[in-house]
Amino acid sequence: MSRPEQDSPQDLAPAYALGMLPPEESRRFESFLATSPEAQREVAEFRDVSALLALGGGEGPHSGLRARVLERVRKDQGRPLPVAAGSSRRPAAALWIAMAASLLAAVGLGAGLLSLRREVGQLEAIVSQQRSTLAQRERDLASREATLNRIFGPGVQMFQLTGRGDPGPRIQLFWDRQHNQAIVHGFRLEPVPPGRAYQLWFIRNGKPVPSITFRPEPDGHVKVEQVAVPADGSVSAAAVTMEPESGSAQPTLPLLLAGELQKS
């Protein structure tokens, strides 16, 4: 009984082209290859498959493609492939090339899906950031609205603390006499060096009473709410000096801004 066609030396062409034969078997096949132009052509065709697989090598979505195709070749070594009627040999390497190309196409679809997922993730991050920004703006608007409600509340008076220059720095002091609290709103304030700050003073019974310290924003603006105003005695004026950031018990001259606080 003759041996099956798949056991002929030529059937080793796929494994040889893809580097799967052990050294001794590879040498025996090379001896056969030197005498068979058809086997030489088939090895060349299978090496085209290997070139296709190289496109799928390396890291990323193509990883493992070569191993999967080699495993498929290894399994098919032991069983015949379908052949056309009347054919005496295995089908052309085009079948293997088609198989590799199909796998590459599937990997390409997978890579496209991963790319799409990344784009969706980026869009979701942008939307999340925009929502966060919108929420912060809503909080800022709510805070400003609350400040305006306090400024225009009953018994609130506005006084100006001015400095030198035209236009010079200015502070609006909104005094809520009912609650003995003030809102300090300053603009065009000069920046202060590290470790220093502006300090507010109330002049009560002719003497300075230390109050809050503050540092303006880079644009020269500052807003401080719920500033306590001395409730006992007669508060007649307010002033601002430059002091250590932790504040001072007595003001350091010169006065940078000052203004009278006169009752209506």
Image: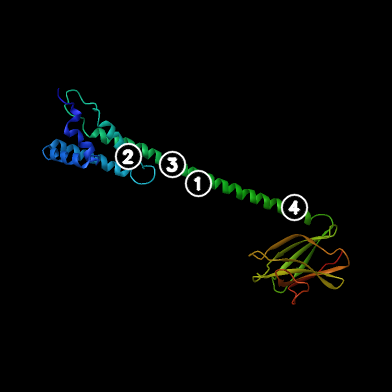
Q: Is residue 177 left or right of residue 161?
A: right
Position above or below: 204 against 72? below
The residue that label 2 is drawn on is 67
Q: CA distance from mark 4 to mark 1?
A: 36 Å
Of badges 3 and 2, nearer the viewer stands: 2
Q: Mark 3 is on which residue type?
A: Leu
Q: Answer few, some or many: residues within 10 Å of disc 3's Cα (few below 14, many 20 plus, some between 14 and 19).
A: few
User: Residue 167: x percent and y percent?
Assistant: 69, 70
The residue that label 4 is drawn on is 146
CB-based contact (under 8 Å), mark 4 and mark 1: no
Q: Quadrant of residue 221?
A: bottom right
Q: Give the secondary structure at mark 3.
A: helix
Q: CA distance from mark 4 to mark 3?
A: 48 Å
Q: Is residue 97 left or right of residue 211?
A: left
Q: Mark 1 is on which residue type?
A: Gln
Q: Give the secondary structure at mark 4.
A: helix
Q: Quadrant of residue 4?
A: top left
Q: Mark 2 is on which residue type?
A: Ala
Q: Of callouts 4 and 1, which one flags the residue occurring earlier in the amino acid sequence?
A: 1
Q: Which mark is residue 85?
A: none
Quadrant for the C terminus in the image: bottom right
The residue that label 3 is drawn on is 114
The residue that label 1 is drawn on is 122
Between 125 and 26, the residue placed more toward the observer is: 26
User: Residue 257: x percent and y percent?
Assistant: 75, 71
CB-based contact (under 8 Å), mark 2 and mark 1: no
Q: CA distance from mark 2 to mark 1?
A: 33 Å
Q: Mark 4 is on which residue type?
A: Ala
Q: CA distance from mark 4 to mark 2?
A: 67 Å
Quadrant for the N terminus in the image: top left
